[in-house]
Image (cartoon, rainbow, N blue to C red):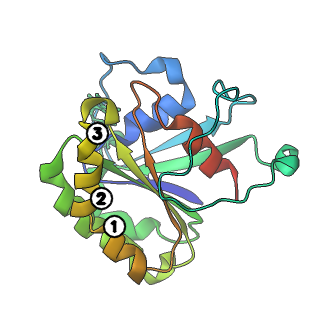
Amino acid sequence: MSCICLGPKRSGKTHLLKALQEPDSIDETSYSMPTIGTGIYRIHFPTKSPNSDKPKPPPADGSTQAHHHGGKKHLPKSIQILEIGGSMAPLWRQYFEDVKKLIYVVDTSNLCQISAAGVLFYSILTEPRLQKVKILLVLAKMDYSYRQMRNEALLMLQMSKLQKQIRQQVTIVEASAVTKVGLDPIYEWLQWP
Ligand SMILES: Nc1nc2c(ncn2[C@@H]2O[C@H](COP(=O)(O)OP(=O)(O)OP(=O)(O)O)[C@@H](O)[C@H]2O)c(=O)[nH]1
Ligand SMILES: [Mg+2]
């Protein structure tokens, strides 16, 4: 699978992938069962973004992405994503062959989990087979988190230190499967090669 989605148990991977697949399928009353093993999600890109009339916020990581929207008709219409359940963490490495894109989901509302999430993230970033992979770090459950928890989370993940050491391009998105915040930049990241 060329796109995989990883992160600790209960961090919000299944919820996020379901929301990307079918935004109306998730609300604050939804529950996702823990993923046993892996799950496959085919995500179709929206043909017209519902927020396309609003100005786009700059990317959260401050990087400038010079996309040429003129070539959009040649972009894929959908992508298949493999979720690897958090309980599979010891076996993640079995899935690292031929990966092009990797989504790492952390639960921003659960700072207790974040340092462990950071250790796992670091082991991914230093994996030899993943040196050329595009990485998306999703700060999930933002509807459930205080604004400043985003900064706390990035501090605890030691992102600024990490970004100087690693070779991969890491894009950071704040998202919520419930409010749909952040879904548009995720679609865009998934669609562009
Ligand atoms: N408020 C809120 N709750 C969320 C959100 N995403 C997930 N949750 C809650 O967190 C629970 C766990 O989310 P999952 O998506 O199942 O987590 P997971 O990362 O797939 O977990 P594993 O499959 O065990 O690795 C869900 O049942 C929801 O109750 C979100 O964006 N907002
Ligand atoms: Mg899951």
Mark number for residue 154? 2
Q: Is residue 20 left or right of residue 74?
A: left
Q: Cα distance, mark 3 to mark 2?
A: 12 Å
Secondary element under disc 1, as helix, strand or loop, is helix
Q: Which residue is mark 1?
A: 159
Q: Which residue corresponds to the image point at 42% horizontal and 39% vertical from the top-left?
A: 175
Q: Percent from the top left, x then y, of residue 149?
A: 23, 45
The quarter of the picture where the N terminus appears is bottom right
Secondary element under disc 3, as helix, strand or loop, is helix
Q: Amino acid at mark 2?
A: Leu
- Is the residue under label 2 in contact with that under label 1 (CB below 8 Å)? yes
Q: Which residue is mark 3?
A: 147
Q: Amino acid at mark 1?
A: Met
Q: Percent from the top left, x then y, of residue 81?
A: 54, 48
| First of labels 1, 2 by sequence position | 2
Residue placed most toward the observer, 62 or 33: 62
Secondary element under disc 2, as helix, strand or loop, is helix
